[in-house]
Image (cartoon, rainbow, N blue to C red):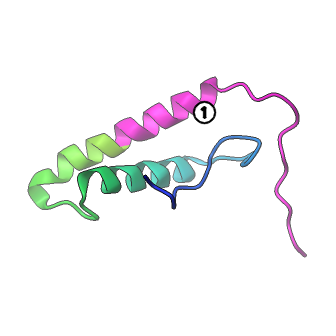
């Protein structure tokens, strides 16, 4: 459904920030609601949904148990 949301779990991504989780939640809510930016009368429920999805995502990531070593990001100098 949301092909542009990047994978946030290890070993694909060893370091996930709050911003990564929030961006994924926002993308999901935008896709499901059909609104890129909600009208003023929908702003509160839209923002609540983003918060709820972000919290559920954090809970999921915190609960996952990954076998094996976590992959490290490669940096290019």
| Quadrant housing residue 73 | bottom right
Residue ID at (36%, 36%) = 52
Question: Was residue 19 drawn as part of the magenta stretch in this picture?
Answer: no
Residue under numbered circle 1: 61
Locate residue 20, reporting x and y percent: 56, 52
Locate residue 13, reporting x and y percent: 72, 48
Residue ID at (9%, 54%) = 41
Image quadrant in which the C terminus is located? bottom right
Considering every residue shown, the one lying at the far bottom of the view is: 77
Question: Was residue 64 drawn as part of the magenta stretch in this picture?
Answer: yes
Residue ID at (87%, 72%) = 76
The one of 27 and 51 positioned closer to us in this rendering: 27
Q: How many marks?
A: 1
| Quadrant housing residue 35 | bottom left
Residue bounds of the magenta highlight? 51-77
Residue ID at (88%, 36%) = 69
The one of 46 and 4 positioned closer to us in this rendering: 4
- Left or right, 39 with respect to 16, comes to left
Locate residue 25, reporting x and y percent: 43, 48
Considering every residue shown, the one lying at the far left of the view is: 41
Q: Is residue 54 above or below residue 68?
A: below
Bin the neighbour count of mark 1 within 10 Å (Cα to Cα): few under 14, some 14-19, many 20 and up. Answer: some
Q: In this view, does 44 lie above or below 52?
A: below
- Left or right, 59 with respect to 12, comes to left
- Left or right, 27 with respect to 21, comes to left
């Amino acid at each position: 459904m949301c092909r542009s949301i990047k994978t946030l779990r290890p070993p694909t991504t060893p370091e996930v920030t709050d911003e990564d989780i929030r961006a994924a939640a926002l993308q999901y809510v935008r896709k499901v609601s059909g609104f890129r930016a909600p009208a003023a009368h929908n702003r509160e429920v839209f923002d609540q949904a983003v918060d709820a999805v972000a919290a559920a995502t954090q809970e999921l990531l915190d609960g996952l148990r990954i076998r094996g070593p976590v992959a490290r990001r490669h940096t290019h100098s």
